[in-house]
Image (cartoon, helix red, strand yellow):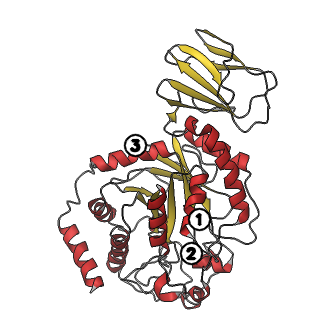
Amino acid sequence: MKKFIILALITFVFSNLSLAQEYQPTAENLENREWFQDAKFGMFIHWGVYSVLGVHEWVMETQSIDKKTYEKIPAFFNPTEFNAEEWVLLAKSAGMKYITITTKHHDGFAMFDSEISGWDIMDRTVYKKDVIKQMAEACKKHGLKLFLYYSQLDWHHNDYYPRGGTGNKAGRPDNGNWENYLDYMNGQLTELLTNYGDIGGIWFDGWWDKKEADWQLQKTYNLIHKLQPQAMIGSNHHQVPNNGEDFQMFEKDLPGENKGGFSGDSEVGNLPLETAETMAQRWGFSLQDKAYKSSKELIQYLVKAAGYNSNFLLNVGPMPNGKIQPEFIDTLKVVGNWTSTYGETIYGTRGGPIPPQSWGVSTHKEDKIYIHIMDWKTDNFFFPTIAGNVKSVIDFESKKKLKHSTNSYGTLVALPENRDYDQVDFVLEVNLK
């Protein structure tokens, strides 16, 4: 009966959508975009049954595990120590304003109660609890917005056919109905946008597996915007945003850069921006991944993202028992200490008038400009002419005024004599008349 109701709802929504129209975001959506840009910092959570193997979220592909064998794994997934409230409070104490969690990764396994699929946490595990429901309730209780990651790519579903560039060793039959798969995907998205309260947005991944396929994106995007007008849509497709998308994301890269090798020639558009990065190397839990990034690296990445007018989505890959690694918790506590002191120099700001430099970045808010100095070894600092007259320059941490002089070229500031050159981020607060 539930399956019939869901399919009827999809049919009704689709029958009332004009697929050819240029996307016009609603007032609720525009308001959510503004909130998103103010938020600046979020937690990414990659968690699924793959965590049992302790390799990473791509293990089915990289170890050529066929579908029948992979279906044995959920029976071992029993995260009895999972506490959604602990995760949410950890994110909140680190200064994060929202959480993006994987509802279905490339292995196709749903971490929520999906009535249109038996390949989910309720039907295949002894745990039999809806992880997404628990996260939605905890986020609502503690004032964080919830975004949902959903993989368009699916290594498990037989109707994901013709195959794309991955998942070709999963042992599925060489036939399938692509339209049926798209209906399945839209059905699960309908469940996610119907059963879990207000959702901040949908974080898509996997389009890149079949770039030439007829994804019917406008049909899916219109469905999402119809069900929850405020929900923002973003896609990790490493290209210019498509019609209907509300924010642009960059994987392991600051906007406009391509150090991670994922962004290619993707130019920076006019939508809100987000960059996602890991705390070690892998996204999902990896027992042998010890390439931990320091708290200094992560804080500076957060600051740089703000200077690039972007949010920072920092990933954790929880263990199969439901706990987040202690190494990650320790680092996030240090990050939280920093955001509790310096948060106002990034929250609610936009990229500043001074473009990102080798020494750091700038942010701005109202009549204040924050100059974030992360690599400067002398006691005098110069920044070029900016719009408005400089009223004062203050050491943000000590609140002491610093001597400065301005001419037609810019402003020279005398930095504190005993300044720690290795400080994570020395911030100048520039007040304008």
Instruction: Please tell me which residue is depicted at 68% across the width and 53% down the height of the picture.
Output: 333
Callout 3: SS: helix
State the image coordinates of residue 371 (x, y, percent, origin top left).
62, 28
Instruction: Please tell me which residue is depicted at 75% across the width and 29% down the height of the picture.
Output: 376
Residue corresponding to mark 2: 48
Amino acid marked by disc 1: Glu
Residue corresponding to mark 3: 34
Q: CA distance from mark 2 to mark 1?
A: 18 Å
Left or right placement of residue 229 versus residue 157 in this view: left
Is tag 2's residue or tag 1's residue first in the polypeptide sequence?
2
How many numbered marks have been drawn onto this rendered protein structure? 3
| Residue sitting nearer the eye, 234 or 148 | 148
Q: Which mark is residue 86?
A: 1
Q: CA distance from mark 3 to mark 2?
A: 31 Å
The quarter holding residue 261 reads bottom right
Say few, some or many: other residues with alpha carbon within 10 Å of mark 1 (under 14 / 14 to 19 / 20 or more).
few
The reply to whether discs 3 and 1 touch (Cβ–Cβ < 8 Å) is: no
Which residue is the extreme one toward the right? 418
Instruction: Please tell me which residue is depicted at 17% across the width and 64% down the height of the picture.
Output: 16
Q: CA distance from mark 3 to mark 1?
A: 28 Å
Left or right placement of residue 247 versus residue 317 in this view: left
